[in-house]
Amino acid sequence: MSMPEPTGRSTFTGYEKFLIAILTILQFTVILDFMVLSPLGAILMPALTITPQQFGWVVSAYAFSAGASGLLAAGFADRFDRKRMLLVFYAGFLGGTVLCGIAPDYYTLLGARIVTGIFGGVISSICFAIVTDIFAMQMRGRVMGFLQMAFASSQVLGIPVGLYAANKLGWHSPFLLIVALGLPVGFIIVTYMRPVDSHLHLRIDRHPLHHLLTTVSNPRYLRGFAATTLLATGGFMLMPFGSAFGTGNLGLSVDDLPTLYMVTGITAMVAGPIAGKLSDSLGKYRVFVAGSALGMVLVLFYTNLDKSPLWLVMLITAALFAAITARIVGASSLMSGVPAPQDRGAFMGVSSAFQQISGGIASAVAGAIVIKTPAGILERYDILGFVVVAAMAVTIIMMFAIHRMVAEPGIKG
């Protein structure tokens, strides 16, 4: 039986609370699989006797295959029950993660990352489509706030546990631990999650390719794609170089980094639900603008820092992560109102694909801007900060057009 989209409520039912929890845990496993690979580099490269360039391909293989599969799957995304779609892609993701956990050499691992990206890259878009189908607009901010906790939780809980397991049991073990966590999640979804198929009654019977083409050519949707593409720019530009900037420019030691990551992760975990609640009560665009404005100030301050004590760096990065969290929660919940019900899966799939691809491009551009000196100093990081702030300013203008398109019940202005 399909779940009708509720209206006029502000409290969650017991089933809705269950759904938020299981989708958050599922997202945690998918995000952890992506995030845990980069910190494993120091262990994995000597173990497989590969170069940094080869390791870079292992990391980027996931993002590019995820982006490609997101586009290819978008045409089919609204033709099936979303629960079944979720299970199929989650099973493929777990299968790819198993291959990572048993890979004996570089080329097997590279192929396994491609398989994992093909399936894992579509899961977030399916989850967001489910949220949009099940929850009314005035409740989506809080839901997106909880889903955002999956990102922070992977940083606070997942990465330290994964690195500990890798040090004790070998680099394969974090992937096998993710599978061990994911299998019960899949079983719970099979057993307790209800079908999500109300969109099937609204769908116009179209060829998948035609559905994809009409989605990517819809002027209303193009505004959303443009905004989400630029939205991902800031994080992908700054974050890959955060540890190098901290140790090379700010005077932090490598031993300080776990504490720094944990503090910022906990801050993001707390900020997610708060930002979600404010989005539903004050307005999603207002929360997005507030987070963006604070983030712009902090990015400029942070990227121009010199040698600094750990407490100051923690304070600035924690505030920056809170601002970024508010920005993402406001934007994603506002963006959920853009597609028509029969196009939600396709819209979310294309949007996710664009984010993956633009993130890869942003990382490459950032790598071309910054320079690391033989002494370990990261130069032109301040220029990167100005580029990120400019992108954030343009996104505020672009999201205003989305805000004007999307009606927020109970919110004025």
Image (cartoon, rainbow, N blue to C red):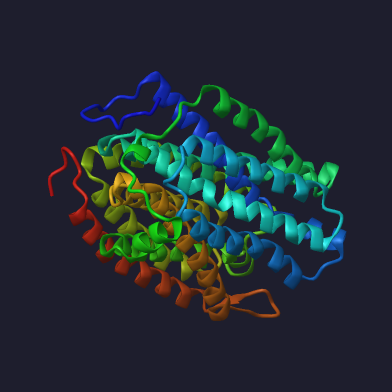
Which quarter of the picture shows residue 409? top left
What residue is rendered at 51% in x and 66% in y? Answer: 357
Is residue 320 something that shows in the picture? yes
Is residue 250 something that shows in the picture? no
What residue is rendered at 73% in x and 72% in y? Answer: 53
Out of 150 and 250, give the one closest to the viewer: 150
What residue is rendered at 64% in x and 65% in y? Answer: 60
What residue is rendered at 39% in x and 38% in y? Answer: 131
**Quadrant including the N terminus:** top left
Report x, y in % for residue 325.
Answer: 41, 49
Report x, y in % for residue 153.
Answer: 55, 40
Report x, y in % for residue 251.
Answer: 62, 64
Report x, y in % for residue 286.
Answer: 24, 50
Which quarter of the picture shows residue 44? bottom right
Is 166 on the left-hand or right-hand side of 179? right
Which quarter of the picture shows residue 91? top right
